[in-house]
Image (cartoon, coloured by chain):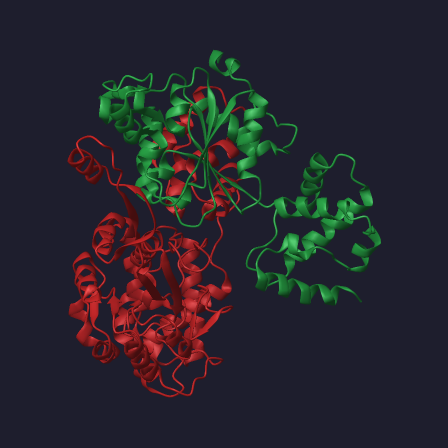
Amino acid sequence: MFIDFFYTLRKVGIPVTPTAFLRLHKALNMGLINSVDNFYTAARSILVKSERYFDLYDQVFAHRFQGVDLEEPDERELSEIARALLEEWLKDPQQLADLLGIDESELGKLSPDELIEYFLERLKEQTEAHHGGDKWIGTGGTSPVGHSGYHPGGMRVGGISRNKSAVKVAMDRRYRDYSQEAPLTQSQMGEALKRLRNMVPVGPKDRINIDKTIYQTVKNAGEIEIIFDQSLKDRLKVILAVDNGGWSMDPYVHVVQTLFNYARSQFKDLKNFYFHNTIYRYLWEDPRRHYKPYPVDELVRLDPETRFIIVGDASMAPYELMSEHGSIYFQERSEKPSLEQLHFIAETFPHAVWLNPVPPYEWNYTQTIGVIRKIFPMFELTLDGLEKAVAHLVRKN
Amino acid sequence: MNQENELRKFCGASQYVLDDELAEIVNISIALEMPLLLKGEPGTGKTMLAHAITEALNMRLILLNVKSSMKLIDALYQYDTLTRLNDSRFGDSTRDVSNIEEYIRMGKIGQSFVSDERVVLLIDEIDKADTDFQDDMLDILDQMQFDIIEIDKTITAKHRPIVVITSNAKKDLSDPFLGRCNFHHIAFPEPDMMKSIVRVHFPDIDKELLNSAVQAFYRLREIKEIEKKPATRELINWIRALRADPDFRVKDLIKGNIPYLGVLFKKSPDYSTAQKTVAHFKI
């Protein structure tokens, strides 16, 4: 019963589990569910475990039970994808033509505008004809996170992605299950990060040390002497700055999120900042990088003993890093090149590392990674890399 | 089916306005013997729901307030070493020093297990604790038993308590945890719903006051750049303040004169933003 419904939920990206599905059946067998309305509420509370997926659930439900079509990517998204395709085309016409199975010379005659038009047509055809087909652009995939949680219609190829083929990433995505392949799990990460903690006794002496109490009592020939200790608290300050913008970071979002979640539960004094690609005059305290700017200059006011952890792929166009007005955001014009800001941070916080989700063997292929590596010690965002990074961060000097 | 008849259905309480959807979810969770996880903005009545269930089903409520430093064992039982040490030294108590069991005290979860009647166990703000705590606790709630290591005894629940867990969504809960709960997100109530909520708390409230207060409240919630939006709790306290003030006239509210902003906005930047915005209301 409702097997299709269950699999549609899975397909659109809601993490539903068989156990939960069985439980739903148990509820059905107990006669608790008597109407479609009942079923809607019960199934949602049993199957869906986060309000992030409620909307998606509604869509699937409407689709299954009322025959409403699942939402397709709209025009704007398609044109974004088309634009990304154009980028690829300009880089390497042959490769893309092969991927799409079209004749390169034929397309070569078209102007960029016509090309976009052409891609757009192709995409529309694709999305109409192939749901979960095996062609090159998948619909119905979900981006696991991002600002708005998930993406109902399908995947998004946002903006420009350098040095990484958008088409390739789009293809990868469909076969990849981040939740299983992520190089780090939460508990592994916990083990690695735990060593970062700097436990010091603070506060009133309010904790009984039983061993010492017994020892002292015996020493006093049975006259009870109770020994109190201060409790241990973590006093380490950590700043975690995350590159959460751009398509190039998207494949690593899951790993970064795990790190993030863990750090949040682990460190009492944790500041989160966000940036896109690299750091200019401001870091952002809100993930949308819009409402709460934090001037980089202000960082001097923080404790220099703070551990500064930057997470990002460090992959961008060289001018974004080196030029005086390198930011890809028009409104974010800064006088100093980002490179200087990075130097400034590295000088302010001697304990700083850069964690890079890109595997190290690819580091040599991206110029900006090389430049940033000279400023910050860079480690791979895997268990191994994290351990090395932690070892670096706990060093006293 | 028999089982269902035995269960008293939960359908609201005197101090709690319940929507049908939530009532259904509560009843299903009770029937399936699953913990119910409630998420939602602070002040939308997550904790109140447990109180309401308690009242409606006429059961006792056991409240476990989760703290960040809490260890699971604290919620289960405590072994009072100090008293035992003291007794062994002075020997003037009625307790038998050689019997460790006399020095075991049940924690909140333990109490809900050994209780002679079925109780409601409210685990408040589970997200404060770390993930290990959450996972281990769910194991225990799943099995409905735990061991007391000191006396090598297994405590099994006499009656499966109705478990309600609340979370402020400060951080995401782990997957195994979520897998063992039913989930509901309490959305912020619509103005009409809000009015009936207010009416439950102030049955004799003047209609004009109710309408303009709720209207002003939703307008204040609209203000951008507010970090902590005022919620139901704040509204109710605010109306209480308005009613207590002999100088207050409902007309003031309509004119855009909003007193006691401090009741609604608890953070100082929020307060000043609200004050500035409210100044524009008066035109």
To which quarter of the image does residue B116 belong? top left
In this view, the residue in front, B172 or A306, is A306
Q: Determine the residue positioned at 34% across, 64% down.
A: A240
Tell which of B62 and B46 is nearer to you: B62
**Is residue B42 visible to us here?**
yes
Task: Give the mark count.
Answer: 0
Q: Is residue A79 left or right of residue A379?
A: right
Question: Residue B121: x and y, percent?
Answer: 45, 28
Instruction: Say which quarter of the image contains residue B48.
Output: top right
Seen as rendered, the residue at the extreme top is B2
Q: Which chain is green?
A: B
Side of B233 where A317 appears, left or right: left
Query: Does residue A248 appear left or right of residue A51 in this picture?
Result: left
Nearest the camera: B157 or A200?
A: A200
> Is A100 located above or below residue A31 in the figure?
below
The quadrant of the image that shows the C terminus of chain A is: bottom left
Residue A169 in percent (x, y) is at 30, 63
Horizontal and vertical percent position of residue A160: 37, 73
Q: Give the percent coordinates (x, y) of residue A122.
A: 40, 64
Residue A36 seen in render? no
Report the quarter where the N terminus of chain A lies.
top left
User: Observer-nearest residue: A142 or B61?
Assistant: B61
**What hue does chain A carry in this figure?**
red
Task: Judge from the rendering whether residue B53 lies leftward or rightward of residue B31; answer left or right.
Answer: right
